[in-house]
Image (tube, coloured by chain):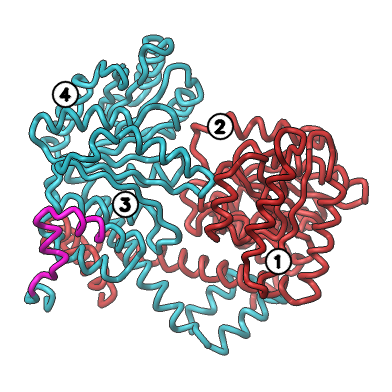
Chain colours: A cyan, B red
């Protein structure tokens, strides 16, 4: 409660006023897991919650960035401020791919109403998904009304990231039969909208039919998933995608799904912060603790198994 | 201490006798984060620690599996039992790539002295790196003397996985300039051996020189990194790689590095298990806790920030 009585920091004031450098600085603080990042978030948090956060995921080369670029152009034309956060949990090996993606968004680089940022964190205590949620809240607080949370690369980490969005778009390309198989297996249950992009390149209509067939197997209680065809480079299907996203947004606002998702995500965020605090406190307690050192000696000598050592820590 | 008085379970006995099905079952238990997995690990743990664990990482297409296949053939010829654990933290999108990798190891599928297993975990509490360490201990307990821990795909998750190995091999292909740049930036500081594979395909000699140039910038106190050229498909350079790995092994055994690495890895394992136990206990405590529900209501309403809610949990 002391915090509420304090004047907001200069960084928070500048961020809330929409200052891009302050926002960039804030995102660096949360991705570097700096305590100042959480303090900043606490200051601006009351001003969050109004942005529509759309997560965009899919295999590399599906055209996610081009699609976001096309959507951004439409949202700007409608007078909305846009934020794009690209999440890259991949190693240095794929540095080139990320750069290529950024170039596809370059037409928006000079637009002051569009904030574009890539984020890759190494070893953040709460993990990448957690840092992505915090960065999204900062972009929201800075007044961006539409936020695209894009994943670069593939993996469980990305799925965790887009789970923080209000709406999830899965982008596929025609002929990626693996992805449809995965959809069938139920592991890709999270999308609200499935886009088959680059309609000119392959048998998109057949793939749309195949995806609809798979989705028809879902239980009747499952929320409806919209399936669309686009060609982001040519600009085909973008207006329909924008409409579908707005309709989906109205639906989840009206039926309580949005509130439920945000509650679940914020619960995870609270637990992640609590876990990080606990881990820090434990590390501090064990630093130079002779009893822990002898426990470890026993584990290294294979006389005590790691789980037993973990239990012994609790009684300490 | 009660555990020490108990007779080992049948699964543990079979695993220790080298039964492949028992080992496969054990790995499933640890990758699914089943409590039975940790119990099994506790039973067989005294019989671990003698295997040489080699982590093999590098960008997709560098020929990691082919290289492991070639090394496996040599180790088998020397009468050693081999285990290969391929870690795949990637999403269903890349299922095809993993299958292709497995095919490259197929010549060893029928050899009873070689155990090959892919592992992909979703949401294991301790994370993938943790599950990989546990699986490696089980493969070790089952009597495999050389264990190759291979990462499929790229990312921080893989770096965390190979950090659990005794020795780390980084496999690159000629012309992958990005990787050399990354080496320069110091982010790839973990390898003991760097292999430039597919020597016939590109300017390998130039790349080896470039890598040596970068490594020469390391402080004099840094351990020596061996740089080699191979062509795994043609079998060139494999004997030299095997020799380099054995020499490196002898060096880290003699100078205490091995013990130090294992101690660090086991420390992380103990803390990961302790963290998972803490998280489970917290979830159980919060289940149906009305006070936590009202805290969350405040967070959702943006009246309380997530970090403040996390602090409030501690005083609960």
Q: How many marks?
A: 4
Tell me the chain of label 1.
B
The residue pinned by badge 4 equals A243
The residue pinned by badge 1 equals B45
Mark 2–mark 4 Cα distance, whole angstroms, equals: 33 Å
* A295 shown above or below A31: below
The residue pinned by badge 2 equals B95
Q: Seen from this angle, which residue lies furthest bottom?
A: A290
The residue closer to the viewer here, B103 or B209, is B209
- Please state if A82 lies on the left or on the right of B134 as rendered: left
Task: Please report contact status of discs 3 and 2: CB closer than 8 Å, yes or no.
Answer: no
State the image coordinates of residue B163 (x, y, percent, origin top left).
61, 60
Q: Which of the two discs, 3 and 2, sits closer to the camera?
A: 3
Mark 4–mark 1 Cα distance, whole angstroms, equals: 58 Å
Tell me the chain of label 4.
A
Q: Residue at x 86, y 42 (%)?
A: B73
Q: Quadrant of residue A223?
A: top left
Q: Residues within 10 Å of mark 4 (few under 14, many from 20)?
A: few
The residue closer to the viewer here, B278 or B192, is B192
Residue A70 visible in the snapshot = yes
Task: Please report contact status of discs 2 and 4: CB closer than 8 Å, yes or no.
Answer: no
- Please state if A31 lies on the left or on the right of B168 as rendered: left
Mark 4–mark 3 Cα distance, whole angstroms, equals: 26 Å
The magenta segment is A7-26
State the image coordinates of residue B98 (x, y, percent, origin top left).
61, 35
B294 part of magenta stretch: no
Secondary element under disc 1, as helix, strand or loop, is helix
The residue pinned by badge 3 equals A132
For the residues tagged 3 and 1, is the chain the same?
A: no
């Amino acid at each position: 409660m002391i915090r509420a009585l304090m004047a907001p920091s200069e960084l928070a004031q500048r961020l809330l006023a929409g200052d891009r450098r302050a926002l960039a600085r804030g995102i660096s603080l949360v991705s570097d897991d700096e305590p100042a990042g959480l303090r900043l978030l606490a200051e601006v948090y009351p001003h969050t919650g109004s942005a529509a956060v759309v997560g965009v995921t899919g295999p590399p080369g599906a055209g996610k960035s081009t699609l976001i670029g096309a959507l951004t152009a439409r949202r700007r034309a409608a007078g909305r401020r846009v934020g794009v956060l690209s999440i890259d949990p991949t190693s240095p090996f794929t540095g080139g791919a990320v750069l290529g993606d950024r170039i596809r968004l370059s037409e928006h680089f000079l637009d002051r109403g569009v904030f574009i940022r890539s984020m890759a964190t190494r070893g953040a205590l709460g993990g990448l998904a957690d840092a992505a949620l915090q960065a999204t809240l900062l972009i929201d607080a800075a007044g961006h009304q539409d936020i695209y949370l894009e994943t670069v690369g593939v993996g469980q980490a990305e799925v965790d990231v887009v789970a923080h969005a209000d709406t999830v778009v899965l982008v596929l390309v025609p002929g990626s039969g693996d992805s449809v198989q995965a959809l069938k297996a139920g592991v890709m249950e999270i999308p609200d909208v499935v886009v088959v992009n680059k309609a000119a390149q392959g048998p998109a209509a057949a793939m749309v039919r195949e995806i609809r067939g798979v989705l028809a197997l879902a239980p009747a209680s499952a929320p409806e998933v919209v399936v669309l065809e686009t060609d982001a480079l040519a600009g085909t299907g973008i207006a329909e995608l924008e409409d579908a996203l707005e309709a989906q947004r109205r639906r989840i606002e009206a039926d309580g799904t949005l509130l439920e998702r945000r509650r679940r995500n914020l619960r995870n965020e609270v637990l992640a912060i609590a876990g990080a605090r606990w881990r820090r406190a434990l590390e501090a307690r064990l630093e130079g603790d002779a009893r822990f050192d002898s426990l470890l000696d026993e584990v290294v000598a294979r006389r005590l198994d790691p789980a037993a050592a973990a239990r012994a820590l609790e009684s300490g």
